[in-house]
Amino acid sequence: MPLEACMLVIDNSEYMRNGDYPPNRFDAQADAVTTVFSAKVDSNPENTAGVMTMAGKSPEVLVTPTQDIGKILTALHGSKSSISGSVDVLTSISIAQLALKHRQNKNLRQRIIAFVGSPLSEGVDEKQMIKVGKKLKKNNVALDVVCFGETDLNEARLRALVESVQNNDNSHFLLVPASSHLMSDILLTSPVLRDPSEAGAGGSGDAEMGGGGGGFEFGFDPSLDPELAMALRMSVEEAQARQRNADATASTSAASTSTAGASTSSTAAVPNTENEVTPKAGSKALPSATGASKEDEDMEDATEDDPLLAQAIAMSRGEASSGGSVAPAAASAKKVVDQEMEEDDDEEDDDEEDDDEEDEDAEDEEAAIAKAIAMSMNPQDADEEEDDEDDEDEDDEDEDEDDEEETTALTKGKK
């Protein structure tokens, strides 16, 4: 808070005996005055605050601006025993201004905080209020008015007084209705005790406080719990950052979708007068034709190695171009497939025959080897077998000679 010298003007009229503010109006007001004094003095070691009354026989200054809270408590206790009469707001404000004018430290700014809890005199109208307010403004005196108790009767005139003093939002009007909340708690969270440099401190200067969280960003005074205020502020900033990222992502996706739609519509084909299809974007026609010719070359290379693929491509092209029946092409393709299957079967048969011949040769070789082994083990048997074979050969030769002689004799007989 800035350097200030304050005068706390309290109401000690008969209306302060009412119990609509717990425990009663005067005690609630005294508690609020103590809270304001502590807040002002603790905010800066050079700040001072004094107390004066505005009812009784006449307005009276009880304590000039000081930093001693003991003097303030003594003055409040003494004024409680002198509750009487009615308030004189205009005279009290003028006396408070004079008390601030004679402050010891002239560098301190001047501020008056008035607590009004009883009805104003009927002889006091808004014009007189505005006149006093302009005088305060001329002397650079700020004014805060805390209206409680008789709020309906006093609000309009007290609000006019504050508005006439208003200068760069240095004055505030606080309306405190009767509720279960303490007046001191409401003041702690009100613009009256808020540092003007804090965020959200600006405004019209008026406030209506029914609870303990009005006016501050998170519903409480950040100076009371700075760590909690910092955590809440960081959480809010993170949430705002996530929201900004989500909005940016959504806008990017929407832009890409619109761009894709625009490119699709720009390349759409438009029929001409000769029932031909002409690309709308002429610059994109050549790349597409080049790509088609390249695909055709690749397909031709592939069909040279695979006749079936060539047949299938021919079938598809014929169907796409003519749009008629494809039965003949299908039949020819089937015939080619059957021929290839027959060739595969013949090749398989040949392979089987070769395998059988190889098996027979292997068996003959095995028999010869077994016979040789047996002969080597029984030489006599081998010789006998050789003799038997020689006898068989001689018999065969004799039979052949006999057959030849018979053939020769028959030939001669015929001749």
Image (cartoon, rainbow, N blue to C red):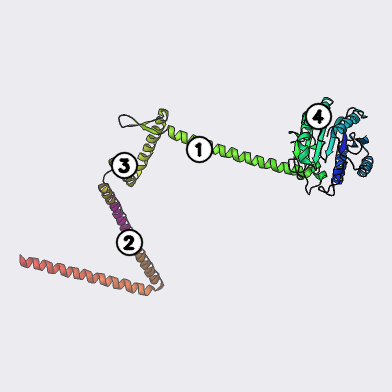
Q: Is residue 271 left or right of residue 131?
A: left
Along the viewing direction, whichever of 376 and 66 lies nearer the viewer:
66
Secondary structure character of the magenta stretch overall: helix
Where does the image place residue 101, in percent across and percent down from the top left?
Answer: 90, 28
* Number of the front mark, 4 or 1: 4
* Number of the front mark, 3 or 4: 4
User: Which residue has dot 3 on it?
Assistant: 320
First in sequence: mark 4 vs mark 1: 4
User: Which residue has dot 2 on it?
Assistant: 357
Mark 2 touches mark 3? (CB < 8 Å): no
For the N terminus, the image quarter is top right
Question: Is residue 193 in view?
Answer: no
Q: Give the label on residue 74, or none.
A: none
* Number of the front mark, 1 or 2: 1
Cα separation, mark 2 vs mark 3, equals 53 Å
Name which residue type carries label 2.
Answer: Glu
First in sequence: mark 2 vs mark 4: 4
User: Which residue has dot 1 on it?
Assistant: 257
* Number of the front mark, 3 or 1: 1
Q: Give the label on residue 128, or none.
A: 4
Mark 3 lies on a secondary structure that is: helix
